[in-house]
Image: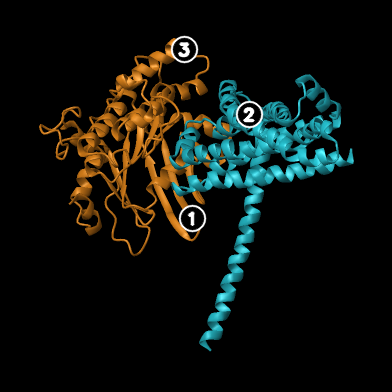
């Protein structure tokens, strides 16, 4: 009798645990949605923290240029080096600039930039706000009648929304330079010729959706990083969890947006 | 004092008019709070308490009618904070189980109790960092449960909160920490005036030299002082101190207690202090409330409670 009862209880507990996990999952999803919508409500409300937005733009944009530039340069060069043998087999070496430009502008540039920003900026925001939550600095703002959402979340999210597209455009340009230099390892092509060949294959439909989606990438990186930090539970462990989950969740969100953007672009 | 639970022993005496007079008599006998022990240890606070705050001089306005004067006096006597039937639970754990208390104008109410009895939750409910499940909190005649966000923020400016770890913004220097609330709330104040106010506050807490330091370079006691300066810069009428001396050596703890007394005297602040530090309680308290299992267990002056025969109360004073 005892083992049957205990198995029954174990199953009951497992079901209850599963149910509470689902409940928790839906609660978090709802909370994140409310948090994301609150951004739009708060962003239009004065006071406009111009100074803080500029400072965050400096941290997000300027401080990321070296990393983004180096990664993009390598990306452009590697893409050219890797595709060259296949293109050479078809005698289509002259198409390499066009192929590189389309793949970099449409997909690789924005996505790689966004993923690097998830790691660098999303984790920083998650850890920074998480640490502020744990050390009661966010509570201190609240009791001083300063809206911490407005001061911390809105400014950071605006900064990422504005800076990630600029970083993506910068990444595209640096990738072209990398690709051009890699092209000249085996072949000889003037810079003017390379860029002409690259631009010929680029159309408005390649550039416009790619830039638009980077605004969404910037928004989700900022808002998810801030959300994870803002909702950190008490304790130092939660700071690490906030940073880590900010990277994971924002990377996932970037890929989901990218997939949706690809589907929408395909319909146009 | 009130009896909330059958398992809880008979309550101590609630503060009466006679007690209040006794309290004032006791307070008359105190030494200067700035006076430190000869050894500077701060261990012995036998004679340390806050000096009573002198009532402002009566107005010379002869047009004030007797009934108006009575109304003014009644208004003055009205508690600045009244808490009624406050309950708060986290999951199944009920932290506050019907707390009732009030704070009079210019009074420092000290709340004593063991860890986990809901003292910090209680003061967090006062500023909207936690929301009670039941009960009413009345601050300056406004029930905070009914306030909108903007109204709550207007009230929060009048209520300062000193956190246990001071909660200084660690990305800002001391100057920026103090300037931040001014930048948010005193937009029209000229920069020179803001700078003068920051210096005045730092002078008050004795840390004018630390103005350009980062919080990470400050000691625990210095952080508390800067935290206090940052809170007082908005000139709150009520202060809530969450364990102001916890984690400090006895000498520094005594300095912080003295600072609380000085600030109360200078700015005529009503306050609630949560503490486990009996020396701090003795030095700063006008009245003490002891909390046990989420209710007010005993209430009275330090001297009243020290004389108590209750075994649980004795554990604090021995």
In the rendered structure, the answer to whether residue A178 lies left or right of residue A229 reads right
Q: Which chain is orange?
A: B
Quadrant of the rendered image containing residue A153: top right
In the rendered structure, the answer to whether residue B182 lies left or right of residue B276 reads right
Element carrying mark 3: helix
Q: Is residue A252 above or below residue B283?
A: below
Chain of residue at mark 3: B
Q: Circle 2 is placed at which residue position?
A: A69
Residue B90 is labelled as 1
Element carrying mark 2: helix
Which hue belongs to chain A?
A: cyan
Residue B191 is labelled as 3
Q: Position of residue B258 (x, y in %)?
A: 24, 31
Q: Position of residue B157 (x, y in %)?
A: 47, 29
Nearer to us of marks 2 and 3 is 2
Q: CA distance from mark 3 to mark 1?
A: 45 Å
Residue B14 is labelled as none
A17, B23: nearer the viewer: A17
Nearer to us of marks 3 and 1 is 3
Mark 3 crowd level (few <14, some 14–19, many ≥20, 10 Å Cα): few
Q: Residue furthest left?
A: B38
Residue A71 visible: yes
């Amino acid at each position: 009798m005892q083992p049957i009862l205990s198995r029954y209880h174990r199953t009951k507990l497992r079901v209850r645990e599963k149910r509470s996990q689902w409940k928790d999952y839906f609660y978090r999803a709802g909370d994140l949605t409310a948090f994301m919508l609150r951004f739009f409500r708060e962003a239009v409300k004065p006071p406009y923290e111009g100074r803080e937005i500029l400072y965050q733009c400096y941290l997000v944009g300027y401080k990321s240029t070296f990393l983004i530039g180096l990664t993009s340069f390598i990306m452009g060069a590697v893409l050219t080096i890797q595709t060259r043998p296949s293109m050479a087999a078809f005698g289509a070496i002259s198409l390499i600039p066009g192929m590189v430009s389309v793949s970099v502008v449409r997909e690789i540039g924005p996505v790689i930039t966004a993923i690097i920003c998830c790691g660098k900026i999303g984790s920083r925001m998650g850890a920074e706000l998480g640490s502020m939550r744990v050390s009661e600095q966010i509570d201190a703002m609240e009791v001083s009648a300063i809206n911490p959402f407005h001061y911390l979340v809105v400014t950071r999210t605006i900064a990422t929304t504005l800076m990630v597209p600029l970083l993506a455009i910068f990444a595209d340009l640096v990738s072209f330079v990398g690709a051009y230099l890699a092209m000249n390892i085996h072949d000889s092509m003037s810079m003017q010729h390379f860029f002409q060949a690259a631009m010929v294959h680029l159309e408005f439909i390649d550039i416009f959706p790619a830039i638009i989606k980077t605004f969404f990438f910037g928004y989700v990186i900022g808002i998810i990083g801030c959300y994870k930090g803002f909702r950190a539970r008490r304790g130092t462990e939660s700071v690490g969890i906030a940073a880590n989950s900010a990277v994971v969740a924002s990377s996932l969100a970037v890929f989901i947006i990218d997939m949706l953007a690809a589907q929408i672009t395909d319909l146009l | 004092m009130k009896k909330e639970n059958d398992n809880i022993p008979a309550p101590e005496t609630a503060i009466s008019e006679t007690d209040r007079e006794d309290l004032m008599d006791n307070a008359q006998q105190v030494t200067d709070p700035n006076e430190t022990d000869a050894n500077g240890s701060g261990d012995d606070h036998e004679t340390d308490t806050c000096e009573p705050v002198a009532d402002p001089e009566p107005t010379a306005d002869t047009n004030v009618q007797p009934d108006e004067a009575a109304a003014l006096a009644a208004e003055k006597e009205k508690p600045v904070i009244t808490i009624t039937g406050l309950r708060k639970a986290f999951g199944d754990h009920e932290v506050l189980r019907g707390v009732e208390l009030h704070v009079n104008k210019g009074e420092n109410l000290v709340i004593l109790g063991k860890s986990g009895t809901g003292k910090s939750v209680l003061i967090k409910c006062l500023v909207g960092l936690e929301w009670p499940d039941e009960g009413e909190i009345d601050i300056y005649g406004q029930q905070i449960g009914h306030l909108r966000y903007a109204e709550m923020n207007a009230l929060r400016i009048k209520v300062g909160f000193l956190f246990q770890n001071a909660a200084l913004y660690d990305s800002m220097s001391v100057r920026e920490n103090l300037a931040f609330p001014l930048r948010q709330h005193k937009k029209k104040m000229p920069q020179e005036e803001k700078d003068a106010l920051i210096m005045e506050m730092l002078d008050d807490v004795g840390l004018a030299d630390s103005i350009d330091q980062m919080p990470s370079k400050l000691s625990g006691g210095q952080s508390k002082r800067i935290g206090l300066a940052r809170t007082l810069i908005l000139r709150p009428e009520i202060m809530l101190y969450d364990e102001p001396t916890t984690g400090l050596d006895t000498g520094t703890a005594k300095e912080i207690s003295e600072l609380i007394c000085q600030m109360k005297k200078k700015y005529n602040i009503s306050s609630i202090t949560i503490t486990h530090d009996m020396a701090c309680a003795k030095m700063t308290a006008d009245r003490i409330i002891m909390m046990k299992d989420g209710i007010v267990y005993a209430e009275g002056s330090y001297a009243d409670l020290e004389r108590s025969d209750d075994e649980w109360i004795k554990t604090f004073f021995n």
